[in-house]
């Protein structure tokens, strides 16, 4: 599916027109190419690559170099979708200078067109610096995994009125700072609906209900490749059993010498075989 290139401006146009924004988190070239061809609007190269693909326990472990590596791969597979790089833990919290430099790397080295930054009031100055340097920023509020140890685990955020007020305030601050959109992760549906009505920029739901301006899920979750699918995600196909069956069949056929067959092999012309055998025969006689 081809179409006009999606940009940060497109996001705002879609919100204004009431069109839902569709985004997936993905981490490599072949899946990025398929996502782009399917007409998905944006690909987030999420720091979730840390535990989904790289085998770390959480998102805190992934490095900037690893994020750039995966962002490069994704950007090479995309023509239409907006590519967004996820700023990893400690790539922006330390200083505005670090934030500007690392955000710029996603665009300059990774081929991304924007970055996502977790957090509200505590990192507003960093987000502002990134935007002023020329890099578009997607905000991220609610359950922000880089703050997981402060939350005491993966827990729904904004369930009380006091907690919800803080998230609403942070969303307005992000809007004023100039973010082009805001991800709302694992907050009550009622809260995400209120925020979507309170801010002019698009909101993207990640487990925040259907009332946002768009939805984002992890590719591996919708394909059944994550092992455990979060409550807010939908498994559109369960590929894991099919892959396991294919692997078992491959092993069985190789062990039984059923693969490869003649159809999977290359052939040498008979005259070349005779010439090779003659050469080998002479070599043996010379010894």
Image (spheres, rainbow, N blue to C red):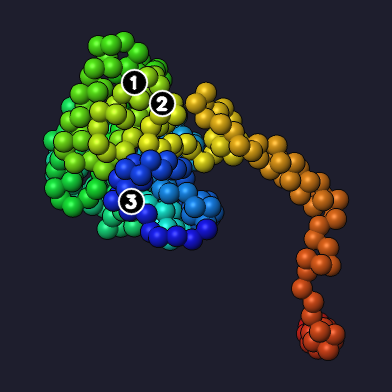
Asked whether the beta carbons under mark 1 and mark 3 sit within 8 Å of each other, the answer is: no
**Which residue corresponds to mark 3?**
10
* Disc with the residue nearer the chain's start (3 vs 2): 3
Q: CA distance from mark 1 to mark 3?
A: 25 Å
Report x, y in % for residue 100. 18, 47
Q: Nearer the viewer, residue 138 or 228?
A: 138
Q: Earlier in the sequence, mark 2 or mark 1?
A: 1
The answer to the question of whether label 2 and label 1 lie on touching residues, with beta carbons closer than 8 A, is: yes
How crowded is the residue under tag 1: few (<14 C-alpha within 10 Å), some, or many (20+)? Answer: many
Does any portion of residue 193 appear in the rendered image? yes
Q: Quadrant of the C terminus?
A: bottom right
Instruction: Give how far apart the Cα atoms at labels 3 and 2 are.
Output: 22 Å
Labels 3 and 2 touching (C-beta < 8 A): no
Q: Secondary structure at mark 2?
A: loop
Q: Does residue 59 lie above or below 9 as drawn? A: above
Residue ID for mark 1: 191
40 with respect to 66 (left or right): right
Residue 181, by quadrant, is: top left
Q: From the top left corner, tell me how far across and down residue 85 is, in percent.
A: 34, 46
Q: Secondary structure at mark 3?
A: helix
Residue under the point 31% across and 38% down: 202
Return the mark for residue 208. Answer: 2
> Which of labels 3 and 2 is toward the front?
3
Residue at left 32%, top 17%?
158
Task: Estimate the x, y position of residue 273 in percent, counting from the top left.
Answer: 82, 83
């Amino acid at each position: 599916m081809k179409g006009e290139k999606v940009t940060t401006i497109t996001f705002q146009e879609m919100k204004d027109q009431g069109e839902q924004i569709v985004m997936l988190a993905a981490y490599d070239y072949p899946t990025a190419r398929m996502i782009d061809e399917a007409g998905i609007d944006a690909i987030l190269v999420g720091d979730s690559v840390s535990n989904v693909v790289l085998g770390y326990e959480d998102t805190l472990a992934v490095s900037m170099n690893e994020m750039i590596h995966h962002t490069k791969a994704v950007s090479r597979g995309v023509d239409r979708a907006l590519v967004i790089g996820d700023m990893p833990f400690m790539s922006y919290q330390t200083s505005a200078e670090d934030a500007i430099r690392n955000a710029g790397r996603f665009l300059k080295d990774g081929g991304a067109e924007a970055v996502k930054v977790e957090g509200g009031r505590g990192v507003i100055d960093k987000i502002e610096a990134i935007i002023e340097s020329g890099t578009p920023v997607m905000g991220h509020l609610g359950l922000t995994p880089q703050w997981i140890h402060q939350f005491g685990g993966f827990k729904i955020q904004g369930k009380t009125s006091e907690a919800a007020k803080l998230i609403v305030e942070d969303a307005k601050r992000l809007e004023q700072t100039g973010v082009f959109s805001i991800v709302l992760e694992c907050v009550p549906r009622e809260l995400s609906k209120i925020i979507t009505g309170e801010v002019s920029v698009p909101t993207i739901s990640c487990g925040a209900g259907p009332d946002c301006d768009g939805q984002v899920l992890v590719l591996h979750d919708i394909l059944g490749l994550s092992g455990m699918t979060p409550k807010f995600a939908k498994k559109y196909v369960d590929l894991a059993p099919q892959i396991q069956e294919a692997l078992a069949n491959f092993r069985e056929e190789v062990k039984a010498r059923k693969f490869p067959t003649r159809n999977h092999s290359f052939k040498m012309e008979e005259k070349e075989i005779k010439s090779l055998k003659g050469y080998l025969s002479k070599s043996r006689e010379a010894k």
